[in-house]
Amino acid sequence: MTFKAIFIPLLLPSSLYSATLYTGSPNSIFDSANWDAGLPAIGNQGTISTDAAWPSDNDLNGADLVLTEGTLTDASTSFSTNEIYGGTIFEIQGGTWQRGGVVRMHGAAGVTVSGGAANIGGIAAISAAAGGGQDGGFTLNVSGGTMTMNNVINFNNQANLSTINVSAGALLMGYVASDTRTIDESNSLFNLTGGTLSTYSLNMSAADNNIVVTLSDGQFIVGAGGYNPNSTDGITDQRNVNFSPGGSATWQLDGADQATFEGLYTNGTLLADGDNSSPFGSTFQVSGDTISLQSVPEPSSALLSLIGLAAYIRRKRS
């Protein structure tokens, strides 16, 4: 008997393969003539691999955009222009996104830096405040490359909870000595699972809750601006720095010592696994101005041998 291979074509929506390539250099990314298959949109991913221009007074609304090479020069200097919203997906895989002013993100937008660089300026580098037509929070992911936010950084998102994830690379915020605040008025969740999250200060508004920095792995640095959670009970107010169990994250707090960290632990603005009931000394270790979870010692070879012997005896008895 002879079997013949039968090939059944798998029909998938053509939109899954839809893509458009930027062909201008360095013209506006909002001019359809500069794309080979129409403007980028959800379902029609646009790739920029050369120098490009993002003129002022142009929002990314419902776009799907990837920067792989070149410099995307963003002409906006105001939070009210060149907003990112409407479920927009914007990823920097390489090259540079260069913007002098504030970025307002909202409306379930997602921005990812997985390579290259994003350089953001302005008085408030990320703004998604209540009012003004804001319709939801945003997600910012740094999984490679570097995102640098200059001047005062204000994650101002009082009505809509947003999430900032750092898993590799670096998110650097506010090193200028004149800065009085860096992470402020947030209503945002920061998750560090690798790489570096560095900020001049961590000053949390007393008017907002849901400002939690969760540390699993990687390096968290708070500079000379200090840590001010504006809370006498960081658990109740949900304004705290929380170490995840089993993680190897470190937190460097400029000018801190063990007494500083113990005070934060006592008032619940420093936690381990969302709690501060265990003795500080058995939970954390402090070296200079840096704190981390107590390391769990590896069992010695002698102990492992005893464990193995005990298991053998139990098997023999059974």
Image: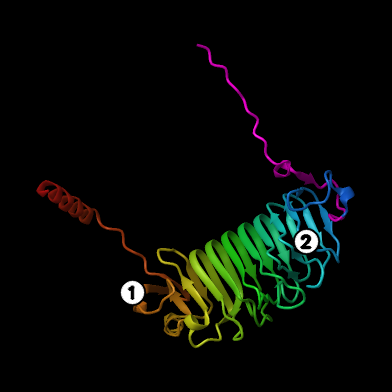
Is most of the magenta stretch helix, strand or loop?
loop
Instruction: Determine whether, in the image, residue 158 is placed left or right of residue 292.
Output: right
Taking depth in this image into account, of 116 and 161 the one nearest to the observer is 161
Query: Residue visible at 76% across and 58% down?
Result: 62
Find out whether residue 87 is within the magenta segment. Answer: no
Stretch of the chain drawn in magenta: 1-30
Viewer-proximal residue, 232 or 138? Answer: 138
Q: Residue furthest left?
A: 317
Instruction: State the colouring used for the structure image.
Output: rainbow
**Residue annotated with mark 1:** 282
Residue in the picture at 69% in, 52% down: 94
Categorize mark 2 by other alpha carbons within 10 Å: few (<14), some (14-19), many (20+).
some
Q: Earlier in the sequence, mark 1 or mark 2?
A: 2
Type of residue at label 1? Ser
Q: Residue furthest bottom?
A: 232
- Foreground pick, 79 / 201: 79
Q: Residue 150 appears at what percent x and percent y? A: 70, 71
| Residue 261 x, y percent position in the rendering | 45, 80
Q: Quadrant of residue 259?
A: bottom left
Residue receiving disc 2? 61
How many angstroms separate mark 1 from mark 2 (CA)?
50 Å
Report the amino acid beneath label 2.
Answer: Asn
Task: For label 1, count other residues whose C-alpha is less than 10 Å away and answer few (under 14), some (14-19) or many (20+).
Answer: few
